[in-house]
Image: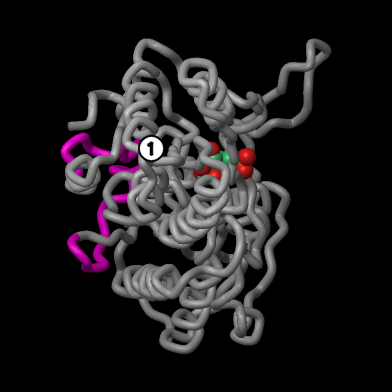
Amino acid sequence: MASNGIRRIGVLTGGGDCPGLNAVIRAVTKTAIMNHGVQVCGIEDGFLGLVQNRIKELRQEDVSGILTVGGTILGTSNKCNPSRYCTGMDEQGKPIFKDVTDRCMDHLQHWRLDALVVIGGDGTMSCAKDFIRRGVNCIGVPKTIDNDLIGTDITFGFQTAVETATCAIDRIHTTAASHHRVMVVEVMGRNAGWIALHAGVASGSDIILLPEIPFDYGVICEFITQRHLHHRSCTIACVSEGARPVGGRQVVNHHDPTSPDPVRLGGIGKIVADEIEKRTGAESRVTVLGHVQRGGTPIHSDRLLGTRFGFHAIELLMGGQRNRLVVMRNHKVTDIDLLDAADKQRLVPLDDTLIAAARAVGTCFGDAPVA
Ligand code: F6P
């Protein structure tokens, strides 16, 4: 039976999608209905659906059969922040922003939602903060392929993205060897190099470039030249979209001024491949993995993580907790104050043991000659 005054909750998925979102929606909905007799409403397209009052009741049958499906049955948006909502463009083509949080509060009241489960990354948690300030109880569930949310050791979606990138690089390996080429593979991750580090090490990439370790073209090219001298016919470089040379800047693919996080990175892979070819004479190619890393069916670990996170979110609510973020710490699902996690990014620490292990097996990070 419903307790702690909670009879009906809303659930939304915000930011870029990732594999495992449906596992969380399913766990939240089923746990709420079956364990606690609480009704669940799905808010479409993240906070955009709250602004536009696109909300619908979710029944058990609505979340049946979605555990293995990628994406999100609720839809998502990485452009909507209710406190800075884009209502159109002015004559100069600049976006006009308005605070529509009041409108969202009316919709929450209309649907009699006693709490919100917000499934998202740092941008979504940042939006949740504004509702917490107005007294709405928000429980956050951390998602992103980038794995860059502060407070949790892992976000769901990350492991599937790493698996996808690893399999892709494995395939690139065989064609690289056949043609004796340098193959540069650009992976996602924004300002954090988690995907590049994990997929790079798992695929045995020879060079891994991370945003956290600015690289030197001289070091990379000398490494490739030495490989050729030692009859290593091909080289694989796994490059994070946020990587940059020492003293250089990240490569911006485009700006989306209507988005709370307007910068979209991308393009460093091609620059690196061209520079390697120019300096070493080695034939080089680039592959940008792009959104393939976000799509498709979640691997088993993200299904498990999503299920555990969704269950924990509801248990927190029903236990009378307020404004918590579900996290994984030291292999245990637990929770922290949501306000401590909003607006912060978790980068790869330079003393990460995976970096040390990769260096020990001869991987070049572009910052120092490899022994
Ligand atoms: O945050 C997830 C992510 O996939 C990043 O890795 C990437 O930089 C960005 O989103 C791409 O955003 P969009 O889907 O708007 O192109």
Give residue 83's position: percent from left, percent from top. 56, 34
* Outermost residue to the right: 91
Whether 265 is drawn above or below 219: the answer is below
Which secondary structure class fits the magenta region best?
loop
Q: Amino acid at mark 1?
A: Ala
Regarding ligand 1, which quadrant of the image does it lie in? top right
Residue bearing mark 1: 192
Q: Is residue 123 magenta?
A: no
The residue closer to the viewer here, 270 or 92, is 270
Whether 194 is drawn above or below 297: the answer is above
Q: Residue at x 46, y 20 (%)?
A: 280
- Graded by Cα atoms within 10 Å as few (under 14), some (14 to 19) or many (20 or more), the crowding at tag 1 reads many
Q: Is residue 339 magenta?
A: yes
Whether residue 106 can be seen here: no
Quarter in which the C terminus is drawn: top left
Element under label 1?
Answer: loop
Quarter in which the N terminus is drawn: bottom left
Q: Residue at x 39, y 45 (%)?
A: 205
The residue closer to the viewer here, 50 or 91, is 91
Whether residue 11 can be seen here: yes
Q: Residue at x 62, y 67 (%)?
A: 42
Give residue 306's position: percent from left, percent from top. 43, 69
Residue 309 in the figure: left or right of residue 26: left
Give residue 294's position: percent from left, percent from top. 57, 54
The residue stretch that appears in magenta: 330-352
Residue 180 in the figure: left or right of residue 78: left
